[in-house]
Image (spheres, rainbow, N blue to C red):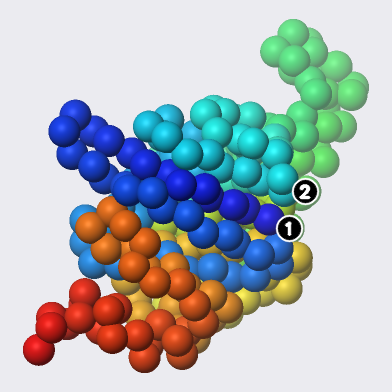
Amino acid sequence: MLEVSAITQVFGGVTALDDVSFCAAKGAITGVIGPNGAGKTTLFNIITGIYRQTSGRVTLEGKDISGLPPERLARRGLVRTFQNIELFGGMSVLENVMVGLHTKSSSGVLSCALKMPWSIAEERRIRTEAMKWLEFTAIADLADVTAGNLPFGKGRLLEIARALAVGPAIILMDEPAAGLNSRETLALARLIQAIREMGITVVLVEHDMELVMDICDRIVVLNLGKKLAEGTPREIQENPEVIAAYLGEG
């Protein structure tokens, strides 16, 4: 589904990523882990078009997507959530998800301003579809709440709902469990598994090792900008290099 090939990223004289390669299988949950500063978010920023890599390439279903901007990637079915929640704080929860459906909208500014019948019908359809995603993420009861007033955990769910509204083939999640309590993390695990069951490929960066080991099919480990290991959760748990990177040689 997604292939990262020999990605290197240099900022000034600092090499943030050094020849990193891995694949994310279609319909699977792939975890990317590593100590702080390993290059995980930088890698996500490259895949999702925020950074342009120094060298290497990214392919989605066999097609080179290197350097494409985020809005074009969304139309190709690749979306993401962020480590720091990115919401339209002054808009309602429902309106935030409706924004995620912009790729399916054909009405222009003029037809909306003139309230043309097809524009009104499309707006109604988008609103209905947005509500379905709020129901899927269990926050439909908050549809009319201003997004900026949401508790942190609900904001996480809203960001996921908005990404899903695009109708992605693959979703990248950057530390989705950050800031969540144990109950919220358990609910998040069930949600991610439900997303996979819909046929959507998931790639996530995460520090919660219990979550990663419970839900991921394969795990990629980065350390100091390089790929340290790749394998099943059991293989990663038993890898001495991974243990040393996290806990020290002793």
Left or right: where does residue 2 sit relative to residue 235? right
| Residue drawn at 77 percent across, 29 percent down | 105
Q: Residue furthest right?
A: 117
The amino acid beneath tag 1 is Lys
Q: Looking at the picture, how far across and down is residue 19, in whole percent? A: 39, 49
How many neighbours does mark 1 have within 10 angstroms: few (below 14), some (14-19), or many (20 or more)? some
Residue 153 visible in the shown view: no
Where disc 2 sits, the SS reads helix
- Mark 1 in CB contact with mark 2 (< 8 angstroms): yes
Which quadrant of the rendered structure holds the N terminus?
Answer: bottom right
| Residue drawn at 65 percent across, 70 percent down | 28
| Residue drawn at 72 percent across, 45 percent down | 62
Tell how many labels: 2
Above or below — where is 73 with respect to 35?
above
> Label 1 vs label 2: CA separation?
7 Å
Marker disc for residue 132: 1
Marker disc for residue 35: none
Marker disc for residue 128: 2
Q: Looking at the picture, how far across and down is residue 213, in whole percent? A: 45, 84
Q: Looking at the picture, how far across and down is residue 244, in whole percent? A: 20, 81
The amino acid beneath tag 2 is Thr
| Residue drawn at 33 percent across, 39 percent down | 9
Which quadrant of the rendered structure holds the C terminus?
Answer: bottom left
Using the image as rendered, state which of residue 126 and residue 170 is in the foreground.
Answer: 170
Q: Looking at the picture, how far across and down is residue 134, in whole percent? A: 64, 59
How many neighbours does mark 2 have within 10 angstroms: few (below 14), some (14-19), or many (20 or more)? few
Q: Residue furthest left?
A: 250
